[in-house]
Image: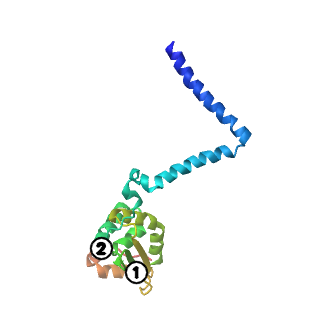
């Protein structure tokens, strides 16, 4: 006997709650009801932003992190990113060629030798900066990518010249090719 009265009581209260809702929008119009809901949500938002309620929000979540960044700490994080993202071939190749130089308090510059490397940095910059900012605890960190236009562009060598330069740079390769009795057919 007590079970049927309990379920009927909550369903009765929910029915009265539902019946009171449809009766309000009809005379007042459908615009008034959503406005009341929005108002209640706005007041919740105001309470969260209110300095009196700030204790409910973790203090570090709203603050920007600004730990000092040295060239050494950046170089370490730089190499960690390169090791963790081997799939970004052009970017990682450029990153391994050097480390950024300090240009300001939270600003560094990195010089690449080819526009394709600059493009690789541009496409991966959000991912790279998120990693570096989190690793170094500095939300103000900026890295500017520069293209060194003074570098002589790499030119494609004909096969015979490429092989001649490779043998000059690595005499063991010349010995290997001689032992294999290899010849370049062009």
Residue 107 in the image: above or below residue 12: below
Q: Please tell me how crowded label 1 is: few (under 14), some (14-19), or many (20+) other residues with Cα within 10 Å.
A: few
Quadrant containing the C terminus in the rendered view: bottom left
Residue at x 50%, y 16% (from the top left corner): 3
Tag 2, which secondary structure? loop
Are dots 2 and 1 in contact, CB under 8 Å?
no
Residue at the location (63% across, 32% down)? 18
Residue drawn 42% across the image and 86% down it? 152
Give the crowd class for mark 2: few <14, some 14-19, many >=20 residues within 10 Å: some
Q: Residue at x 43, y 63 (%)?
A: 127
Measuring from the top left, give residue 20's x and y in whole percent: 65, 33
Image check: 6 left or right of 151? right
User: Is disc 1 placed on a helix, strand or loop?
Assistant: helix
Residue 26 in picture, x, y percent from top left: 73, 38
Residue ID for mark 1:
160
Camera sees residue 145: yes
Alpha-carbon span between mark 2 and mark 1 = 46 Å
Name the image quarter holding residue 34. top right
Residue 16 in the image: x percent, y percent? 62, 28
Q: Is residue 105 above or below residue 136?
A: below
Q: Which residue is mark 2?
A: 70
Q: Residue furthest top?
A: 1
* Residue lying furthest bottom: 150
| Quarter of the figure with residue 149 | bottom left
Picture coordinates of residue 59, whole percent (x, y):
37, 57
- Horizontal side, residue 120 vs residue 135: left or right: right
């Amino acid at each position: 006997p007590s079970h049927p009265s309990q379920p009927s009581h909550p369903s009765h209260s929910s029915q009265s709650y539902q019946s009171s809702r449809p009766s309000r929008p009809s005379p007042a119009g459908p615009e008034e009801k959503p406005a009341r809901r929005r108002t209640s949500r706005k007041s919740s938002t105001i309470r969260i932003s209110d300095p009196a309620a700030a204790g409910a929000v973790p203090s570090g979540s709203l603050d920007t992190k600004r730990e000092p960044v040295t060239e050494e700490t950046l170089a370490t994080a730089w190499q960690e990113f390169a090791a963790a993202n081997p799939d970004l071939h052009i970017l990682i190749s450029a990153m391994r060629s050097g480390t950024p130089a300090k240009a300001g308090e939270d600003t560094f510059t990195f010089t690449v030798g080819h526009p394709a490397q600059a493009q690789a940095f541009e496409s991966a910059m959000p991912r790279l900066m998120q990693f570096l900012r989190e690793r170094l605890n500095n939300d103000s960190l900026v890295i500017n990518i520069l293209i060194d236009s003074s570098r002589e562009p790499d030119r494609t060598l004909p096969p015979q010249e490429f092989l001649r330069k490779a043998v000059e740079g690595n005499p063991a390769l010349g010995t290997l090719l001689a032992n294999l009795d290899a010849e370049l057919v062009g």
